[in-house]
Amino acid sequence: MNSEEPEEEVRRPTVVVLFLGVAVPLLLGMMDQTIVSTALYDISQSFGSFELVSWVVIAYLAANAISAPLYGRLGDALGRRRMMFISLVISMVGSAACMLAPSFGWLVAARAVQGLGGGGLIALAQALVSQAFEPRLRARYQGYLATVGMSASTMGPVIGGYMTEAFGWRAIFAVNLPLGLLGLFLISRLPPRQRPRDPLRIDGISVVLLAAMLAFLIALTAPGIGLFQPRWARAGLILGAALLTFLFFRNESRTAHPLFPVVFLRNGTIRMSCLLALFHGALYVSLFTFIPVYFSAVRGFSAAGAGLLLLPVTLGVGLGSMLTGYLVSRTGRMTLFPAAGLALAFLLLLTVGLFTVQMQTGVLVGLFGLVALMLGTVMGVVQLVVQIEAGDRMLGIASASVLLTRSLGASLGAAASGLVVASSAAVADGFSWVFLLAALFALCGSLLAWFIPGGQIEGTKPDRR
């Protein structure tokens, strides 16, 4: 009998309990990133702000980026189950505020509150699952978890489209409340922590510098701010972003309790993996936020119709994540899959960007589905590589660091894509440039994946069962 099999049998009941406990919170955290995409056109019609509507996405992602490493630290110290409960409550409060928003500014602020909760749902779900398994089995279950998460984020536009058309865009936030209550019950069923908790140590200066750095970086590319300001204002934003970035990493290298340990950056594998997560976040969120907007604004589909067109994308991401987890588990190879997958995604997106106008809708949907299949190869592998390098004692902060860089990339990617659309004279041309920008993100990610050291789980051989 294979030596791995008894361990898997012993852990299987725990797997069921864990997935019941983390699946609903993870689904809410990931779905909230994209559920608004098919409603953005309707939201812009309600508030008359099409040029600024991408702020509804940016606010959530920016708050995600700030809160993810905090939850990593708090989960290590206070208990991941407890912090997931708190983060879900915060997310539900933000959802209720979004549902009742009387103005566009209110909606953006409420989305930021929602994002502060969502960062914990995603980071803590990853850590809770990762602490239960050794690397070889972890690859398989990370694949399952990535399938749940990525499928949830791509299901978001489908669900959001139908709910927007049937009940109005406010309904997409109302649905979070009963699901959140279910999540609170399931979290209470999670098994207790096995090892002693770490002391609570958070560097407040790191938190402030991270928030300020992110604000300046987003302002550089966000619609209505950076590139639309006078030259002196743009220069000020650039200098401010550079200074805050320097101060943040300088402080992280000196404080005893960093949010993003600089020791990670000295490790080539972790550094390049986090950069891969950044480009994946920029590609994934910017692309699948603006695909349904494109189908509505340019090709005239309703919100429900645009959401329905994303079903191949939903299936593609889920299938890609599951297959990658299975292949990593069987072969021990890790970075090969995102390297090849993102290279193919680059070629597909380059084709879409160059020939968007000439393509029939069915062909376009098929190509997006293939791109989604390739995107499913990335995040499970990145999490696994970083967690192996960081070691078991730093699982929480390692998972949060990956999510920090992915959320930062997602925020910047959504901001840059929104700027491209808002600054184009012809709306259709703007979306073509968005797809070309996404192709550039895919190319950068592929090149990084090819050169990440340690592409195979150490001490393993291909599983030929």
Image (spheres, helix red, strand yellow):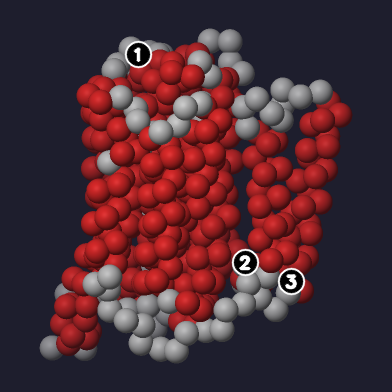
Residue 152 % position (x, y):
30, 47
User: Is 260 drawn above or below residue 41 in the view shown?
Assistant: below
Q: Residues within 10 Å of mark 3 (few under 14, many from 20)?
A: some
Which element is circle 2 on?
loop
Between disc 2 and disc 3, whose residue precedes? Answer: 3
Judge by depth and name the residue closer to the eye, 140 or 61: 61
Position of residue 179 in the picture relative to residue 67 (left or right): left
- Under mark 1, the amino acid is Arg
Residue 9 % position (x, y):
15, 82
Residue at numbered disc 3: 253
Q: Quadrant of residue 157?
A: top left
Which element is circle 3 on?
helix
- Under mark 3, the amino acid is Ser
Residue 110 % position (x, y):
49, 40
Judge by depth and name the residue closer to the eye, 408 or 163: 163
Residue 339 % position (x, y):
45, 53
Q: Residues within 10 Å of mark 1 (few under 14, many from 20)?
A: some
The Cα–Cα distance between marks 3 and 1, rounded to whole angstroms, is 50 Å
Residue at (48% x, 41% y) in the render: 111
Give the quarter of the figure containing the C terminus. Answer: bottom left
Residue at numbered disc 2: 260
User: Is 169 drawn above or below residue 429 in the view shown?
Assistant: below
User: Is 135 drawn above or below residue 153 in the view shown?
Assistant: below
The Cα–Cα distance between marks 2 and 3, rounded to whole angstroms, is 9 Å
The nearer-to-camera label among 2 and 1 is 2
Residue at (79% x, 31% y) in the render: 234
Residue at numbered disc 1: 299
Judge by depth and name the residue closer to the eye, 220 or 338: 220
Whether tag 2 and tag 1 are in contact, CB under 8 A, the answer is: no
